[in-house]
Amino acid sequence: MNERYVNEVIEQVNKTIRAYISCAVSKLCDASYHLFTGGGKRLRPLILVASSDLLGGDRERAIKAGSAVEILHNFTLVHDDIMDNDTLRRGLPTVHVKYGVPMAILAGDLLHAISFKALNDALQGMDSKRVTWAFDLFVRGIITISEGQAMDMEFEERETVREDEYLDMIYRKTAALFMVSAGLGGVVAGGSEDEVSALMDYGRNLGLAFQIVDDILGLIADEKELGKPVFSDIREGKKTILVIKAFERASGEELKVLKSALGNRNASREELSRAAEIIKAHSLDYAYSLANSYKEEAVNALDRVKSRNDLAKKTLLDLAELTVVRRK
């Protein structure tokens, strides 16, 4: 990974986000900006800007569009933390813990609105067909993310979930915004339908790999690396690919331990740890293999795009590799 390229994009995006988050009520502004102070990978804007650079697009336009998707992403995190009652995000108290649920809801609403403002600014001067194309991608992405979050919550109440249902859910909840980011990068750069389609395939497959690895890290990373409470997915009853496979393969006493811990918010750390060990034994290798297969699909999708910027292509390829070996 070219650190200079990555850091330059992240710095430009961070400055742009800071400039966009302003309002007449200081507490609302503080709550809206809170998660950004905890860092974050800025993967989605990096994907968007690199996708635009790949096609020789205008950097300033791409930075504004990248800021739009990152602001939108943080809106989803604020509301997601409320729904899951999570207390920690990026090593910080979640927005609703620090500022209260009502203010957190308003902060999410503000971020949602600002994301449209940033995208609208990014599209100034483009032809109407391309503007419509960009907004259609963005809006359909938001709808899909909402569906994915609803599915995730519904799965917590179900005893069993099939692998294909899980993959559909993570596509909607996570991969869709990766797909939108890469696709928007192509649109704002003036890419053709075939080029945008290839970039969207890259983003979708990268997003699927990312979420599978994210679920893995919920089991194997320590709390400091993870930036949120360890084993929270087990406590909340999340039906990850690891849980699905573990329930398929476990039996006897192991199955009893899993059923006792999954979705039990009163489970002790020892009980959660025991369940995690069982899950890892039965499904960790499978999950990593699945993530790697989606990573390879992402890499292959880039072969369909003629590169105008080798550094941008290398960044996209490196992002794919890093997705499956990351520790946080």
Image (cartoon, rainbow, N blue to C red):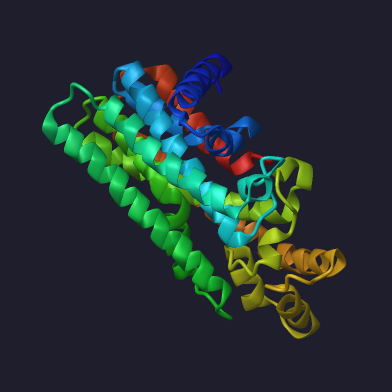
> At 29% across and 20% down in the image, what residue appears?
57
Quadrant position of the C terminus in the picture: top right
Q: Nearer the viewer, residue 109 or 79?
A: 109
Relative vertical location of residue 10 with respect to residue 322 in this rendering, above or below: above
Which residue lies most toward the right here? 270
- Rendering quarter of residue 305: top left
Look at the image and tell me whether residue 292 can be seen.
no
Q: Nearer the viewer, residue 260 or 191?
A: 260
Left or right, 266 with reference to 19: right
Relative vertical location of residue 49 with respect to residue 5 in this rendering, above or below: below
Left or right, 183 with reference to 21: left
Quadrant position of the N terminus in the picture: top right
Q: x and y percent of residue 152 in the render?
A: 51, 65
Q: x and y percent of residue 286 in the render?
A: 61, 60
> At 55% across and 53% down in the image, what residue appears?
102
Relative vertical location of residue 90 with respect to residue 171 in this rendering, above or below: above
Q: x and y percent of residue 131 in the render?
A: 19, 34
Report how many numbered discs are placed on residues in the image. Answer: 0
- Rendering quarter of residue 36: top right
Look at the image and tell me whether residue 62 can be seen.
yes
Which residue lies most toward the left here? 128
Q: Nearer the viewer, residue 255 or 143?
A: 143
Q: x and y percent of residue 246 in the render?
A: 66, 71
